[in-house]
Amino acid sequence: MAQAMTSEDLSLAQADTLRAGLASYCGVYLDDSRRSVLRAAVERRAAACGLPAARYAERLGADRGELQRLAELILNHETLFFRNRPHMHALRTAILPELHRRLPPGVPLRLWSAGCSTGEEPYSIAIAALEALGDPLPRPVEILATDLSAAALAKARAAVYRGRTLSNLTIQQRARFFEPRGDGLAVAERVRRLVRFEQRNLLDPFPPELRGLHGVFCQNVTIYFQLATCRNLLARMYETMADGGALFLGFSETLWNIFDRFRWREVAGAYVYYKDPEPPRQTTPLVATREPRPAPAARPRPAPRPLPTPFAGPEVAARGRALLDAGEAERALELFYATPLAGAEAPQILALAARAHANRGDLDLAVAEARRAIELSPLTTEAYLLIGLIYARQGQPQEAIRELERARYLDARSPLIAYHLAECYREAGRAGPALREYHNALRQLEAEPPDRLIDGVAVGWLSETCRHYVAQLGG
């Protein structure tokens, strides 16, 4: 009988080694906020191998097979059809018709869904192609769909869906492109024929067959990568795309100050990155002429394209923050999604979007967005605050205190930071610092009307809670 095994045996160094190994293998980095995810995955794999967790961690090393099995347990496959509706609208109404007009007759239109999860995205692309170009199609359309997870790909190939994942489909789409299957819907055969599924690791070299792609979807993938990994992947995607090809990233995956070779533009209300044609290279003649021509003057490098308006400026951040303070996360996200995430305010807006996603319960995405905001600008106060609150929610007060102290250093006048820092000090048994921060919060709240909402919480309630704990702690 196998002995009981728990990940409590793991040292901090072993946990760090596991995280680094996973990031090196598949790109996804699990920070401390996802410690429980790593713990649960290690426990399951250690039990399956009949080993204590610490011994399992020592043996894992660079074993790609076991790293794959561990990665299967930590990847998030939640998605739905037509998840990014603005992108799909732009694809259907503008991008696919334009590609069809531009490409010679008979040339296949080639698209890639990188990180396709359980298949909703590539099938959405196939449906958009049939709606945009006609059914039957006037030219070949080839959609490659890849994912690291074998389990996710098995569900994608089965192509039977039910529940929330179908919520964005119209009645007409359900009738035209799906067939009833038990309590769910099966993707119609003519849609499935357009998609080819393959298991691929995005960190592995791209095969030659991927060159010349007209469109790449890679949404909510790179946000979980560390910055260097993200830059490397984007550079390889750039090289594999055809001139004029379109790159579709998730809202959070801004390329501002990360990768500058793509150019972006507004298309049918959505913001899409494009690979612009490279200028022709100057070639040296094979045989020199008797009268050498003077060297041509160097062409100035084109200036970056100006940002379209409205852009992600201070007014967008201010409006979004006001909506979040009033507890209206959905409206705040609608505002953020309607503007390009670029310019000096991008880190702040990314942190606010992370706050909105946290309010909706999507903590993994929220932490990834907050971390990326800090990578873009280490002075993004709200990102530290959000990560601290997520640590606190997960019962990690010491980690929460570390992040909240960083936030307070950047903004010593925020009553919300002071209040949450006091709460974490109290949970950690540090009465003196807790009293100090409760008093700081009360001083900052004095000038505010009791019915004002801060992050959806009334000032009066915050003040009363602070007074309660000051009295309880004897201060």
Image (cartoon, rainbow, N blue to C red):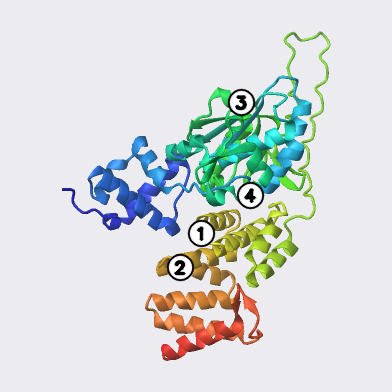
Q: Are marks 1 and 4 in contact (CB under 8 Å)?
A: no
Q: Is residue 96 visible?
A: no
Q: Amino acid at mark 2?
A: Arg
Q: CA distance from mark 3 to mark 1?
A: 36 Å
- Name the front one of labels 1 and 4: 4
Q: Earlier in the sequence, mark 2 or mark 3?
A: 3
| Residue at the (44%, 52%) spot, across then down | 30
Q: Amino acid at mark 3?
A: Arg
Disc 1 element: helix
The residue pinned by badge 2 equals: 393
Give left or right: position of 19 versus 11. right
- The residue labelled by disc 1 is 363
Q: Measure the alpha-carbon separation of dots 2 and 4.
A: 31 Å
Q: Secondary structure at mark 3?
A: loop
Is label 2 or label 4 in front?
Answer: 4
Label located before the other in sequence (4 or 3)? 4
Residue sitting at x 37%, y 78%? 429
Pick whichever of labels 2 and 4 is earlier in the sequence: 4
Disc on res. 168? 4
The first of marks 1 and 4 along the sequence is: 4
Tell me where residue 289 sits by quadrant: top right
Q: Quadrant of the C terminus?
A: bottom left
**Up/down of 312 relative to 121, above or below:** below
Q: Are marks 4 and 3 in contact (CB under 8 Å)?
A: no
Residue 191 visible in the displayed image: yes
Residue indicated by mark 3 = 211
